[in-house]
């Protein structure tokens, strides 16, 4: 039986289902990719006309920079989930920013995070639309759309922008002007927010002892990147497991039951 430490993202606290989430561990083990899905909001409409593309990556000051060059069209980054529409050739680059320096600011604004904080720069051209990824599940409470705003972190403060449209996984704005930017949600709605979550399992061997670490946090590609970098630095190996099939309540407790007879098959070599 594994004794796991359950971690949440710094801003999320623990999240929970409406009942204890009982997981058959062996059924969770996968070999490759985990598609984005949620049974709670599968009835919520989402656009599908996006061409998925992989970014070019580079390392800048210890962080990962993503870069895209695209002709006219509608695109979605396979790493960040960012979507954009352009009428002519564009070049854009971006990286994830850490939310931690802005945690007190969000408290003062009586808001909570709704997605990754993206620092986007246009090297060529302009975008007609940008669709920022969010983690809010609209399956049980569609009124959450009205509580979403776009936060711009500027040189001398912050500003808020209205969302033009909210879809299942994205918040749309028109003719965007870029600074560090993200979706946020008013505290008025935070007591009743369901969120899409990531579930990440890592295994480490120390003194011939297998140590599993399990992370649960609202879906945020920036947080995924941070966890991966931290675990890689500790020599851990990731075991790919599926995301929860439904959303969970923000700021609630979570329990993962693992059968005593659980084993990992196929076996994974830990470096």
Image (cartoon, rainbow, N blue to C red):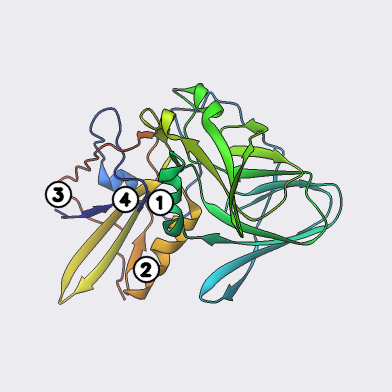
Count residues near mark 2 (Cα–Cα under 10 Å), then give few for <14, some for 14-19, many for 20+: few
Count residues near mark 4 (Cα–Cα under 10 Å), then give few for <14, some for 14-19, many for 20+: some
User: Which of the pair 23/196 is nearer the observer?
Assistant: 196
**Nearer the observer, disc 2 or disc 3?**
2
Task: Give the residue number, with chain letter if any, for mark 4.
Answer: 8
Element carrying mark 4:
loop
**Where on the picture, by quarter, is residue 129?**
top right
Separation of marks 2 and 1 at Cα, in angstroms: 24 Å
- Position of 259 compared to 132: left or right? left
Element carrying mark 3:
loop
Q: Earlier in the sequence, mark 1 or mark 4?
A: 4
Element carrying mark 2:
helix
**Nearer the observer, disc 1 or disc 4?**
1
Element carrying mark 1:
helix
Picture coordinates of residue 18 (x, y %)? 29, 27
User: Which of the pair 128/263 is nearer the observer?
Assistant: 128
**Nearer the observer, disc 4 or disc 3?**
4
Count residues near mark 1 (Cα–Cα under 10 Å), then give few for <14, some for 14-19, many for 20+: few
User: Which of the pair 30/144 is nearer the observer?
Assistant: 144
Q: Which residue is found at the position 15% from the left and 77% from the top?
A: 207
Count residues near mark 3 (Cα–Cα under 10 Å), then give few for <14, some for 14-19, many for 20+: few
Q: Which residue is found at the position 37% from the left and 68% from the top?
A: 230
Separation of marks 2 and 4 at Cα, in angstroms: 14 Å
| Image disc number at residue 230 | 2
Separation of marks 4 and 3 at Cα, in angstroms: 26 Å
Res. 79 visible in picture: no
Picture coordinates of residue 99 (x, y %)? 46, 55
Q: Earlier in the sequence, mark 2 or mark 1?
A: 1
Task: Give the residue number, with chain letter if any, for mark 1.
Answer: 104
Picture coordinates of residue 182 (x, y %)? 56, 47
Task: Give the residue number, with chain letter if any, for mark 3.
Answer: 261
């Amino acid at each position: 039986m594994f004794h796991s430490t359950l971690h949440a993202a710094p801003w999320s606290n623990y999240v929970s289902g409406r009942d204890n989430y009982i997981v058959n561990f062996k059924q969770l083990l996968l070999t490759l990719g985990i598609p984005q899905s949620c049974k709670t909001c599968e009835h919520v409409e989402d656009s599908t006309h996006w061409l998925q593309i992989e970014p070019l990556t580079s390392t800048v000051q210890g962080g990962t920079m993503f870069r895209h060059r695209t002709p006219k069209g509608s695109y979605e980054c396979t790493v960040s989930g960012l979507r954009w529409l352009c009428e002519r050739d564009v070049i854009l680059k971006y990286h994830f920013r850490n939310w931690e320096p802005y945690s007190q600011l969000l408290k003062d604004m009586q808001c909570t995070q709704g997605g990754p904080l993206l620092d986007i720069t246009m090297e060529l051209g302009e975008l007609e639309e940008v669709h920022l990824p969010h983690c809010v599940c609209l399956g049980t409470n569609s009124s959450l759309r009205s509580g979403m705003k776009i936060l711009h972190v500027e040189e001398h403060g912050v500003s808020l922008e209205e969302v033009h449209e909210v879809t299942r996984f994205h918040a749309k704005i028109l003719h965007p002007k870029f600074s560090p930017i993200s979706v946020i949600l008013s505290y008025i709605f935070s007591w009743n927010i369901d969120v899409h979550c990531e579930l990440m399992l890592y295994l480490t061997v120390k003194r011939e002892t297998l140590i599993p670490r399990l992370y649960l946090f609202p879906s945020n590609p920036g947080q995924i990147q941070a966890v991966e970098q931290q675990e890689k630095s500790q020599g851990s190996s990731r075991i790919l497991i599926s995301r929860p099939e439904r959303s969970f309540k923000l700021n609630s407790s979570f329990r993962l039951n693992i059968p005593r007879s659980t084993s990992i098959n196929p076996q994974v070599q830990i470096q």
